[in-house]
Amino acid sequence: MRFAIRDDDTSYFTRPEDLEQVYRHIWDSHPVSLGVVPFHGCARSGAIPEVLWSGEEAFPLDGNPALVSFLKGAIEKGRVSILLHGFDHVDRQGHPEFSSDLGRDELARRLAHGRRYLEDLLATTINTFVPPHNEMSPAALGAIEELALDVLGTFSFRPNRRPLSASIVQPMLRRRLFLWRQRRRGWRGDFYPFPLHVEGHREMACHNLNRDPLCSLEDLLAKLDQTCEVGGDFCLATHYWELRDPLLAEWLERILQRATAAGARFVHADALFAETEAASRGEIAA
């Protein structure tokens, strides 16, 4: 089993000490993949000051040179890798950025610009996208396909969410067959623990360790055990600013201990999209 930590919301507002506080004791052995917002706007978030929850200003990452220098050093040491987490992370008409009424062309422009900006600024390569609030519109899925970015998250296969095509039917049926077989054995939840190849990109399910809403440690450990049993991969999604909570910090430790005992290999999130024999079959436990 491969195990990855996905941490969202690193941006202009993040201080190096915010990341060090929660990860410095683990990231030499448990690398962390940071979902970075390149041009964070004013938005309601625990990651930014409340006074900036509304407004029109944008805050580019390069406005925080201390963070940029810190991230470049952490990348060089293999402690962190960079994921693209939206463009400005601003909701529109009550919908998350990549689930709003922005069209495919505009979303593709944001993806391309944000990706190029972060790659140049941080001297790295970005191949994976994390949508704000884990939501994507059909237009966003089309933009993702255009740029061939992999996605941490899985999205509805309903016809009103994705155009029905041959490239959709195969992964949809593969996932449904796996879940049907596993539910007969008491499978908990509806997650698929392998990457899905969907229309020119790949998607991977994640499991949330968060405070609002409060997750269940019992549920996360059960899903971790199930993933191990079928030779799948596990991606834990969290936020550094929520891990300041001693309870969640303790839960992270317990999850990592369980994964270590199960023989997990701790990797950057991008590595989850590299094929293994189990992932290529997808029904190893059937």
Image (cartoon, rainbow, N blue to C red):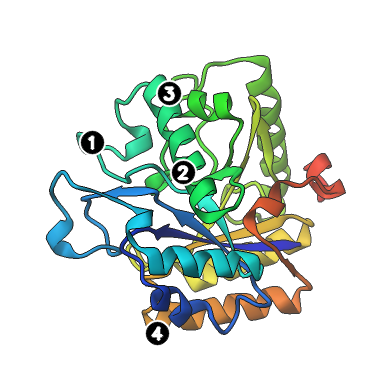
Q: Which numbered mark, 3 or 2, is in the foreground of this view?
A: 2
Marked residue nearer the N-terminal end (4 or 1): 1
State which mark lies toward you, 4 or 2: 2
Place of residue 198 in the rendered image (x, y in percent of width and height, measured from the top left): 64, 29
Q: CA distance from mark 3 to mark 1?
A: 15 Å
Residue that mark 4 sits on? 246
Mark 3 touching mark 1, by CB under 8 A?
no
User: Tag 1's secondary structure?
Assistant: loop
Q: Residue at x 51, y 65 (%)?
A: 71
Instruction: Give 132 or 248, whichever is nearer the viewer.
Output: 132
Residue 262, by quadrant, is: bottom right
Closer to viewer: mark 4 or mark 3: 3
User: Residue flagged by tag 1: what amino acid is it?
Assistant: Arg
Left or right: residue 223 versus residue 35 is right
The residues tagged by marks 1 and 2 sit, at their Cα atoms, a distance apart of: 23 Å
Secondary element under disc 4, as helix, strand or loop, is helix
Give the spatial CA distance, label 3 vs label 2: 22 Å
In the rendered structure, which amino acid carries the disc numbered 3? Ala
**Observer-nearest of 177 and 212:** 212
Q: Eyeballing the image, is 246 above or below 181? A: below
Q: Are marks 3 and 2 in contact (CB under 8 Å)?
A: no
Q: Residue placed at 53% from the left, 30% from the top?
A: 144
Query: Which numbered disc flags the more N-terminal residue, 1 or 2?
Result: 1
Crowding at mark 2 (Cα within 10 Å: few <14, some 14-19, many 20+): some
In x, y percent, where is residue 126? 58, 46
Q: Which residue is mark 1?
A: 92
Is the residue marked by circle 3 packed among few (<14), some (14-19), or many (20+) residues within 10 Å? Answer: many
| Sequence-first disc among 4 and 2 | 2
Distance from disc 4 to disc 2, alpha carbons, whole Å, reads 35 Å
